[in-house]
Amino acid sequence: MAIIIGIDPGSRMTGYGIVQQTGDKLTYIDAGTIRTDTKEMPERLKRIFNGLTRITQHHLKYADEPLYTAIEQVFMAENPDSALKLGQARGAAIAAMVALDLEVSEYTARQIKQAVCGYGAAAKEQVQEMVCRILQLEVVPQQDAADGLACAICHAHSSHSMNKILLNSSMRGRGGSKKKGRWRLTEEDLGNLR
């Protein structure tokens, strides 16, 4: 089991989504936005840093599972000023996670959309709809919060796939039995997974 915090950085609204991963199953824990309703960029960055720190500390305090973070990478915007502000917001979010000694994984918007919708150029509305389906939500989250959840889902799918690959590669030299091109786990290996 693990808890994953996904972050969709923005200079005006930073979305976050938190899910619990148990094997293949994802469970919704929390989602929301950190709003920065001020014109001063240093104050916005402070609010992003403090908001994410407070949310993450809460989950570190009350969760027994390891906590992982994932963040969307900056895309190249047409407006350099917008790209710079987005990069600063992203930096504040990463700094908040690293200050809590958490590892941060990064994913492009295309990777996130591909993981959630199966299509790397999906619209925001499609992402919202698929997040609701995957997490079995009855209420559609706000777009930035849905993007944070999508980032967490992408990390869960990515890490789960990587664990399967690593497990299969480790089995080749350790006595796992092979039948019709598939590696099978021994009872010892199954015990180690629990």
Image (spheres, rainbow, N blue to C red):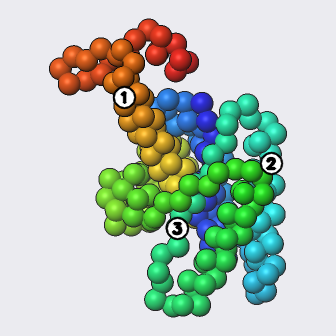
| Disc 2 to disc 3, C-alpha distance | 23 Å
Q: Quadrant of residue 65?
A: top right
The residue drawn where x is 79% and y is 70% is 47
The residue drawn where x is 45% and y is 65% is 109
Q: Earlier in the sequence, mark 3 or mark 1?
A: 3
Q: Amino acid at mark 1?
A: Asn
The residue under label 3 is 73
Horizontal side of residue 152 vs 55, given as left or right = left
Q: Earlier in the sequence, mark 2 or mark 1?
A: 2
Query: Which residue appears farthest toward the left when viewing the image?
Result: 180
Q: Amino acid at mark 3?
A: Gln
Callouts 2 and 1 close, C-beta under 8 Å: no
Residue 4 placed where, x, y %?
61, 45
Q: Quadrant of residue 143?
A: bottom right
| Disc 3 to disc 1, C-alpha distance | 30 Å
* In the depicted structure, whether residue 174 falls above or below residue 59: above
Q: Nearer the viewer, mark 3 or mark 1?
A: 1
* Mark 3 element type: loop
Q: Amino acid at mark 2?
A: Gln
Query: Which residue appears farthest toward the front when viewing the image?
Result: 173
| Disc marking residue 168 | 1
Within 10 Å of disc 3 (Cα), the crowding (few <14, some 14-19, many 20+) is: some
* In the depicted structure, whether residue 92 falls above or below residue 154: below
Horizontal side of residue 128 vs 102, given as left or right = left
* Mark 2 element type: helix
| Disc marking residue 11 | none
Quarter of the figure that contains the N terminus: top right
Within 10 Å of disc 1 (Cα), the crowding (few <14, some 14-19, many 20+) is: some
| Disc marking residue 57 | 2
Horizontal side of residue 16 vs 139, given as left or right = right
